[in-house]
Image (cartoon, rainbow, N blue to C red):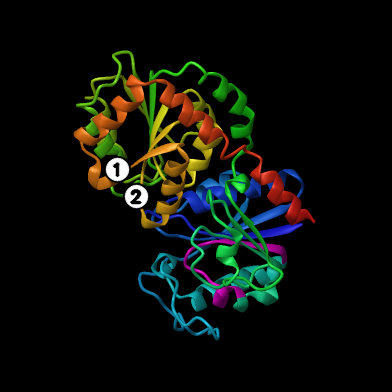
């Protein structure tokens, strides 16, 4: 089976789209599939990282301004608007399709898998001669697609949300049970859940995604200075290799009242999460990793497209949500006090989170791709 992936990472859009595609690609590779990626060379791209996992990756040049035909050059009867995140593409859909067609024409993939908020039915239709079937990974339910399979791993998402956006006969997979997690999360799940049966707060994890372009990490560390963390608590900060605030956060960590280490480009994220008692993290794709391991979370909404995830997890009782505008000592102190003064609250959050994601989503998706 030949599979092509179209996904991007950048300082603006973060790394989550590429990372969940890479998880699926590694699982496909393990069963003998040939996987290749097409990625644009945006600042903050992960092309080298994908190649280090053994996948051929075709780099599309970054354009300073949109070039080529109009975004609306490929028209549909019902939708004449560009996607809300079209500026993330770095060019027009038409130009991107032309560049991808040259690559896909050679590969002739059985599946094209696209994970990109900037692309819709126009791009997909333009490339139809170069793939047998199309899978779309999405979180937004806001634009038309011409796909055979659609995956939205958002907790609480209903397949009916996509009925107006996909063709008849498209298979729709919705819900956090389909979350694309690396196998080590399912492997460490029993250990992680077992150590939470006696709740305490000795290890605090801060993880704001692979980029954190607005330095939410630094703002969290600043707010924590006046918070009631236990004296024997330690802090672990996770950052990506392309994070623009890495040097400043590293300096800031050295002045924290508690032992604070900054880890970059972590390869054993599941183990770090499993050994943590509480996370302060962004409401991105790592939300599902934390849920699988039952890790209670104070969650920040760093982008509007994260809001549905955050609200769903807070409503279920798996997380507490705080807005970036509320990220100051008083708000964080209140949240931490509520969790540390009543430790069983951590246990309740852990059990709720663990019931949301079991770590077997990749297997379910693989079955459909194979069949």
Name the residue that disc number 1 marks.
Answer: 216
Seen from the viewer's position, the closer of residues 356 and 100 is 356
Give above or below for 322 relative to 343. below
**Sequence-earlier tag: 1 or 2:** 1
Mark 2 residue element:
loop
Residue 273: % across, % down: 48, 29
Q: Is residue 133 magenta?
A: no
Give above or below for 225 relative to 81. above
* Contact check, label 1 and label 2, Cβ < 8 Å: yes
Rendered residue at 62%/38% (across/down)? 359
Q: Residues within 10 Å of mark 1 (few under 14, many from 20)?
A: many
Q: Is residue 251 left or right of residue 312?
A: left
Q: Is residue 267 left or right of residue 184?
A: left
Give the residues drawn in magenta, as a range: 109-124
Asked if residue 267 can be seen in this view, the reply is no
Seen from the viewer's position, the closer of residues 260 and 362 is 362
Mark 1 residue element:
helix
Q: Which mark is residue 302?
A: 2
Asked if residue 144 can be seen in this view, the reply is yes
The CA distance from mark 1 to mark 2 is 8 Å
Rendered residue at 64%/50% (across/down)? 25
Q: Quadrant of the N terminus?
A: bottom right
Residue 305: % across, % down: 41, 57
């Amino acid at each position: 089976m030949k599979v092509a992936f179209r996904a991007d990472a950048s300082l603006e859009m973060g790394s989550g789209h590429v990372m969940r595609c890479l998880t699926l690609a590694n699982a496909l590779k393990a069963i003998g599939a040939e996987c290749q990626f097409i990625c644009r060379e945006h600042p903050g791209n992960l092309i080298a990282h994908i190649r280090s996992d053994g996948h051929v990756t075709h780099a599309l040049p970054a354009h300073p301004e949109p070039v080529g035909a109009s975004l609306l050059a490929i028209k549909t009867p019902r939708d004449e608007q560009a996607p809300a995140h079209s500026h993330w593409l770095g060019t027009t859909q038409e130009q991107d399709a032309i560049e991808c067609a040259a690559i896909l024409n050679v590969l002739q993939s059985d599946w094209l898998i696209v994970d990109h908020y900037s692309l819709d039915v126009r791009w997909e239709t333009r490339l139809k001669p170069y793939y047998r079937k199309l899978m779309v990974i999405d979180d937004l339910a806001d634009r038309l697609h011409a796909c055979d399979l659609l995956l939205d791993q958002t907790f609480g998402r209903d397949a009916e949300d996509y009925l107006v956006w996909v063709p008849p006969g498209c298979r729709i997979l919705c819900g956090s049970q389909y979350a694309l997690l690396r196998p080590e999360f399912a492997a460490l799940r029993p250990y992680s859940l077992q150590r939470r049966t006696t709740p305490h707060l000795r290890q605090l994890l801060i993880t704001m995604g692979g980029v954190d372009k607005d330095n939410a990490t630094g703002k969290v560390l600043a707010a924590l200075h006046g918070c009631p963390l236990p004296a024997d608590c330690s802090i672990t900060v996770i950052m990506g290799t392309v994070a623009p605030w890495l040097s400043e956060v590293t300096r800031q960590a050295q002045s924290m009242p508690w032992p604070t280490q900054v880890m970059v480009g972590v390869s054993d994220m599941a183990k770090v999460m499993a050994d943590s008692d509480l996370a302060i993290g962004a409401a991105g794709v790592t939300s599902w990793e934390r849920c699988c391991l039952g890790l209670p979370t104070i969650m920040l909404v760093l982008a509007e497209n994260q809001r549905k995830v955050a609200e769903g997890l807070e409503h279920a009782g798996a997380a507490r949500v705080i807005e970036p505008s509320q990220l100051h000592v008083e708000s964080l102190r209140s949240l931490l006090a509520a969790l540390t003064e009543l430790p069983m609250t951590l246990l309740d959050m852990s059990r709720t989170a663990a019931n949301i994601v079991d770590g077997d989503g990749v297997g379910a998706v693989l079955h459909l791709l194979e069949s």
